[in-house]
Image (spheres, rainbow, N blue to C red):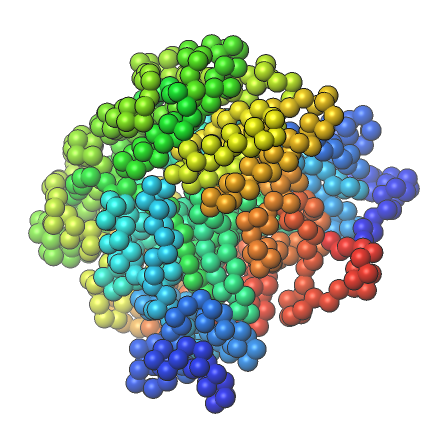
Amino acid sequence: MTTQHKTNSASWKNKFREKLIEIIGKDGVIHSEDELLAYDCDALTGYRIKPIFVVLPTNAKQISEVIRECYNENIPFVPRGAGTGLSGGALPTDEGIVISLSKMNKILDVDIPNQRVVVEPGVVNLWVTNAVSPYGYYYAPDPSSQIVCTIGGNVAENSGGVHCLKYGVTTNHVLGVEMVMPDGEIIEIGGKALDYPGYDLTGLVVGSEGLLGIVTKVTLKIIKKPEAVKTLFASYDNVEDAGASVSGITARGVIPAGMEIMDSFCIKSVEETIGAGYPIDAGAILLVELDGPLAEVEAQLPIVEEVLKENNAIQIKIAKNAKERDLLWKGRKSAFPAMGRISSDYYVQDGVIPRSKLAEVLGEIGELSKKYGLRVANVFHAGDGNLHPLVLYDASKKGDLDKTLELAGEILKVCVDKGGSITGEHGVGHDKKRFLSLMFSDNDLDAMNLIRCAFDNKGLCNPGKLFPTPRTCVEPGMKKFEEHPVQKAGMGEMY
Amino acid sequence: MIKKSVTKKLKSIVGEKNTILEKEELEAFSIDNVLPEIVLSPDNIEQVSEIMKLASKESLSVIPWGSGTKSDLGNKPDRVDIVISTNNLNRIIEHEASDLVATTQSGISLSSLQKELNKENQFLALDPPHINKDATIGGIIATNDSGPERLRYGTAREFLIGIKVVKADGSIFKGGSKVVKNVAGYDLPKLYVGSLGTLGIIVEATFRLYPVPEYSETYVASFSSLENCHKTILTLLNSNLVLTSLELLNPGLATLISKRNNLDINDSEYCLAIGIKNVEKAVKDQIFAAKKISEQNGGNGLLISGSQEEKLWEDVRNFPWDLVKAESVVCKVGILVTQIPAVLNMVKQLSDENGVEIFVSTRAGNGICIIAIRGEGSSITNALNDMRDFISTFGGSLVIQEASTEIKEQFDIWGDIGSGLGIMKRIKSNFDPDNILNPGRYI
């Protein structure tokens, strides 16, 4: 039962635009149809919705005022960083506006002795490491889009990367945020110190996919670069052996900084594209990166080598220097783009399984691939069981995309059946909301909804995402929610 | 007062043997001198749910209870009708050693859990106080308790990956998952870390585990100047050494701990304990480097290992509970690492001026100070007020961990919770609309 068909009225739109301009200025409000097109999707390009306006605020106060207007007029709003998200988290809402944080891109405080950096949400992930690397520090979460993706987006999605096996994901590195609540109130939670009294709202906001408010300032923890780094490379006849190596390594008490697997499809396309020196006929390759104090790394190296051999590694190589190491990683990092060489289109899936089930699940994915007659290339953060199967298809072939999405969904079911998750780092967003109930019961989702309603009782902040079906907010004290007759009759739904 | 008929129903949920109604036995569950009317120890989650349904219907207040080691944390309760003890929820549900993950019921003690995990050479990276008094997993999560090794591993929030909770209305839900990487849905486990039983009864928890480090040594250095000691801390933290713990003891506490552990530290000296756990060679190399840094700053050091080392860390972990008894207030202060000298100097000045004895153990790499104040009634509250004023000027926090009921009535336990308080209250009221869980004690 969306009420805002007023957004179709030119006079209402003009008036609303004037209000926005009053708050942000002319440069900060995008309204021309052409320019709005640039904001109609994020990196999940299969879905597109044009927003009514896009605003580009420069500070929290402006956001607060914009949101108050939205709140009063019941206009939904969607926060947006660099738009690199793969789950449609920044997909605009029908009849809603987009709040782009791209102009809020200042690093506000670099505090080396306390190992903290405070940034605005539009700051690019890699800028943080660049700002602190002269002092020997870095910001650990390193999603593969780190040269463009923003910290605000990382906070929303709780982004990971290739080194999070040992160092954790975004939530383990965010200590506090300033945010504008969905009613316009500006609050500060957490901060540079630890153990502030009160609930861990920071922990709740990180990974909330932009549904709880708009983060306007983020306090990050930085860490010291390790004394030593060693990267190992191993090739295998088949991907199962590579998978078994991964759980073998952690079973021996070694936690590498990262472990990555690529299967033969990926290897071939990467070799043809950039020539990372991978054996082109291998069934799978595994990269293992150890870091830490030199003596620790040196003690772990022979253990890892032993495990690789036990699991039938054909060739084992240890990068001798930074140049060799970079080349090995370059292959991994260009896996997605290189896929374009073997297939005109591909869909990136993101699922998680317990590490020990790797070999088993890879087998099942192989079976599914045969069943659907679609090729699936596997590249993944094997250390934490985070799979990224790439389903290759041809968009020009009728029905291919539908088949692809069906297969990708089957893969998620396999992940959940093995005790895993439907997403390890890309988020639920728009793309995966229908799968959330594979993992969570109605009770579980109700508990999540209580959180959303505490933050956003009108459901205006990035609505239509994450939850499988729209859920209403019940006023505290009202024990049971009674459906409106219109809803009961199935004639409308509430937001 | 619980109605007789309701008491009977409650009793029938868990059975006679799991019900306590006798006054003498209820004494053990008193909170700030308030006795519950009934203590129930459910055998399973369904029973917890049944109790909550009834409590919610009858608007009876409920306090979840692990082993009661931190029952002093929080304001004096508004009312206490029912205590739900998790004593019988003490099963390990699953330990997947190859995944480094374990799921357990919440009433198990950390020490029993560790014993099981240790069989596979793994452990849960939590070293809070009261392990020797059977502190439970549920209690540690609810109070967000931690110890010196948080420097290396962090606190419960970093490795609690899944949780199961019985809500105030008796409904059961779970959050998170059993895999270490997961972003599906809101991160509800984090909300429950430090929620002090106000948002539901934690009945199960899933954790990421770590391999037990092979070897351990600790270098204990003493400094006559706080400034030099702090310089050592900053240099260590700015190095690429991977320390497991870094604890700074003020002179009062250093003297006390030195005597108990034969550390030979002179009165009036600050003491820095640098703990490193790793493979043996990595420990030895890094301890050597740490020693050098300490000596360059005038530290006078001693290397300890084995049982002497274990005993020292046990004392630090359990400070102040096993060390400083009688008439003391315990508080936790959160500041930045660079602000440590200012706080310790203020503490010294306060003890000189107010005639109180103050013992401080500082997690020097985290900016967390555990402070015990010993003295007469009003001198303690004066000292507390001065401390909080001082700490709030640079954005830190001070929370009372333990104090007499009188002091609790005179001094704000939690301090200013800040602009997030409104949303915290809304979350509380959404999860517990009748305010029956731990009412009045926290949010």
Q: Residue at x 37, y 27 (%)?
A: A241
Residue A218 appearing in the image? no
Q: Nearer the viewer, residue A486 or A147?
A: A486
The foreground one among B434 and A394 is A394
The x, y position of residue B57, in whole percent, is 57, 77
Left or right of residue B170: residue B222: left
Question: Could you say where residue B333 lies in the image, as x and y percent from the top left?
Answer: 36, 54
| Closer-to-camera residue (B91/B84) | B91
State the residue at coordinates (42%, 16%).
Answer: A282
- Up/down of B416 relative to A35, above or below: below
Residue pushed farthest bottom?
A: B4
Q: Viewer-proximal residue, B298 or A320?
A: A320
Residue A359 visible in this rendered orientation of the protein: yes
Q: Position of residue B83 (x, y in %)?
A: 41, 75
Q: Position of residue B144 (x, y in %)?
A: 39, 56
- Left or right of B147 in this view: A408: right
Residue at the front extreme of this rendering: A371
Quarter of the view holding residue B430: bottom right
Residue visible at 47% across and 44% down? A418
Q: Residue at x 38, y 74 (%)?
A: B41
